[in-house]
Image: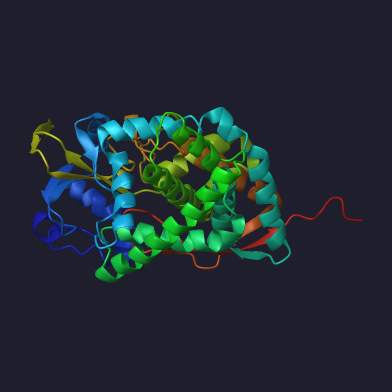
Amino acid sequence: MKMNTTNIESFSFNTSEFFQNPYPFYEEMRSINPIYKSTLLKYQGWYITGYEETLKVLKDSRFHSRPPIPAFSRNYENIRRIQENMMLFTTPQHHRRLRSLVTKFFTPNIVNECRPFIEETVDELIDQVSCRGTMEVVSDYAFPLASSVIAKILGVPVKDYSLFKEWTATFIQSIDFTRSPKTLGNSRKATEEIIAYFKKIIREREQEPKEDLISKLIQEKQREEKLSYDELIATCVLLLIAGHETTVNLISSSIFLLIQNPRQLEKLQDDPELITTAIEEFLRFESPAQLIARTASEDIIINEAVIRKGEQVYLFLGAANRDSRKFRNSHQLEITRNPNPHLAFGHSRHFCLGSSLARLEAKIAIERLLQNVQNLQAVDGNGHYRKIIGFKSLVELHVTFDSYPDENFI
């Protein structure tokens, strides 16, 4: 995919080649300039593909997050209010306040309390497919696991995970740069449904509190009105969506990467203790979130680029994590790579608060799978990726395997 400055401007992101493997394009853009001003995504802004440049923006408090949800339903007052409150996460004052409220429920110790439930859920999912010798990793494994965990944490019925899947896919598509008018229309309907859903759950918890996150957030709301009703709903929506997308992408991509790199798979099977560094390498090599956006709150100079107040900055995390200026053999998967200062979960005040949970789920899911199956193979060697730019997300991944014999069977 060799390009020069001129034909980069005419490059179309909407190609199967790009969705399958965007990294050659990132390399080409970075070779021209790691901070590149363009209208490539039909949005004027600065496209940043360099590691150090990305890190500078993430650490600079003068860059603010862009609103995650487009204003596509202004005729619906209740939806508009919820969306505005979801956008409050992106302004410095509200971001700090809301994040501080939620962060205390995602400390490493609290997350680790989920371990027994995650292990039990993983074992149940493996049992369901072990006799078949085949499974579709996304729908049979990664998504049910992520759904079960976030449902338990929030306190919503896991039986509704089919709804979660539909809502998550619609929301992610609506905030991606590939969105269309039809997508935005679908997103309006999904917004109505998810708001009604959480209103019902919140009313139930107000009457009968439980030991779940929604009940705890309601208590925070009632304590000196630290959390408004709309902020409460927005928080639930964001946690539900975020609790699915990154984790599902991480688990499914990690399994696919091991299949594609049999030597690395063998190394991990021989030494299961490598799972910790392996997870970090999966995050670096195939970042679940590929693109995030920021807005300059004032004129800012990064390297020699003058980014004006109000201009948009698009950070290609997937590109930064493959920058050969920072990572040796950046396009090779090395599960022993250490140190590994990737930016898959962001940095500083915008560091993903659910990162500990995502890591734990992926660690257990991969460990348990490798303990129970052998000869893991992908039916389609290329995989099938969703046509979105902001995330590296497998639509499906069909695999075959042999189950280890049950030693207790006589």
Considering every residue shown, the one lying at the far right of the view is 410
x and y, in percent, of residue 221 in the image: 44, 36
Identify the residue shown where x is 50% and y is 58%.
164
Identify the residue shown where x is 37% and y is 36%.
342
Left or right: where 330 falls relative to 38: right
Q: Is residue 256 visible?
A: yes
x and y, in percent, of residue 90 in the image: 28, 40
x and y, in percent, of residue 188 in the image: 33, 64
Q: Work out whether residue 171 or residue 193 is closer to the camera in this orientation and state it.
A: 193
Where 110 sits versus 121, above or below?
Answer: above
Considering every residue shown, the one lying at the far bottom of the view is 182
Identify the residue shown where x is 46% and y is 44%.
282
Colouring mode (rainbow / by chain / secondary structure / one colour): rainbow
x and y, in percent, of residue 386 in the image: 39, 63
Indicate the quadrant where residue 400 lies. bottom right
Left or right: where 124 falls relative to 180: right
Indicate the quadrant where residue 410 lies. bottom right
Q: Work out whether residue 180 or residue 93 is closer to the camera in this orientation and state it.
A: 93
Q: Work out whether residue 272 or residue 390 is closer to the camera in this orientation and state it.
A: 390
Considering every residue shown, the one lying at the far front of the view is 207
Q: Is residue 175 visible?
A: no
Q: Quadrant of the image for the N terminus?
A: bottom left
Where 9 sits versus 108, above or below?
Answer: below
Callout count = 0
